[in-house]
Image: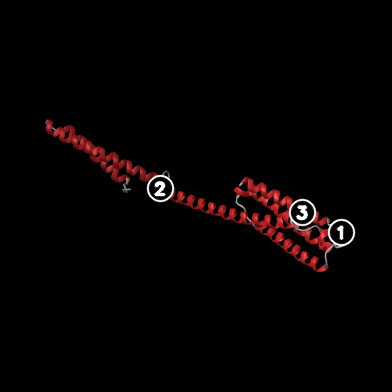
Amino acid sequence: MIDITLIQVAILWSILGLSMICAINARGLFRQLVSWAIVIGIAGAAAFFSYLGFENVKQDIGLSTPLAASSNSEASSSSSSEVENIENDSIIESYIATEKQLLENIATVSDSILAFPNWKNIYSQGIEKRENYESKARFLRNRSADSFRQVRNLRPPDEKSQSYDLLVAAADNLRLAGYEIHHQFGLEADTLGENFDKARKHASQAKSIISTITGKE
């Protein structure tokens, strides 16, 4: 914007005043027309530059913001908002991919626990067979505990908070199922296999919660 001072504006108005005096004292129609045309031109210029000077004063005392600065601020704000939206979408997509993988892992381990033979059948077999099943049970326990740790380490976005709460519940049931199925082998005198029953109950609950999550996606 052109830098206009108050002194320059005052000079313009003073020239306008002198021009009006000359126009009033002009003799003859032609001289009067030319004089008043000059007066009108100077009046327009004085009014225009007065407006510019007034805007400069407002900016100096902070009553208005320069147009360019305002435009830059709006552009910067819009750009920042777009970046935030992109980052938020990326976070959500990353969480959904991780959640999907964890759901698949929980479902796989749950199915393996549910498919585990009855304790009576395992107990009736030789010690070598029992050790083999115990090794499988330890593997399932470790996988269930690992899935639970991964779920607890997740940091879900606000949009997925409800889904995350269900995921934690599913992982916790799987953790308990893994613990119970392995703990049974430390209780060989218990031929009823109550820990197996508890393990299957928790595994079924985990799969039920998974169905609820996938049904909402």
108 or 9: nearer the viewer: 108
Q: Quadrant of residue 49?
A: top left
- The crowd level at tag 3 (other Cα within 10 Å; few <14, some 14-19, many 20+) is many
Reading the image, the residue beneath label 3 is: 200
The answer to whether residue 16 is left or right of residue 111 is: left
Reading the image, the residue beneath label 2 is: 71
- The crowd level at tag 2 (other Cα within 10 Å; few <14, some 14-19, many 20+) is few
Residue 106 is situated, as x and y percent measured from the top left of the image, at 68, 56
Q: Is residue 38 above or below residue 213?
A: above
Residue at 77% x, 54% y is 200
73 or 150: nearer the viewer: 150
Which element carries disc 1, helix, strand or loop? loop
Q: Quadrant of residue 187?
A: bottom right
Badge 2 amino acid? Ser
Q: Which mark is residue 191?
A: 1
Mark 1 near mark 2, Cβ–Cβ under 8 Å? Answer: no
Q: Earlier in the sequence, mark 1 or mark 2?
A: 2
96 or 82: nearer the viewer: 96
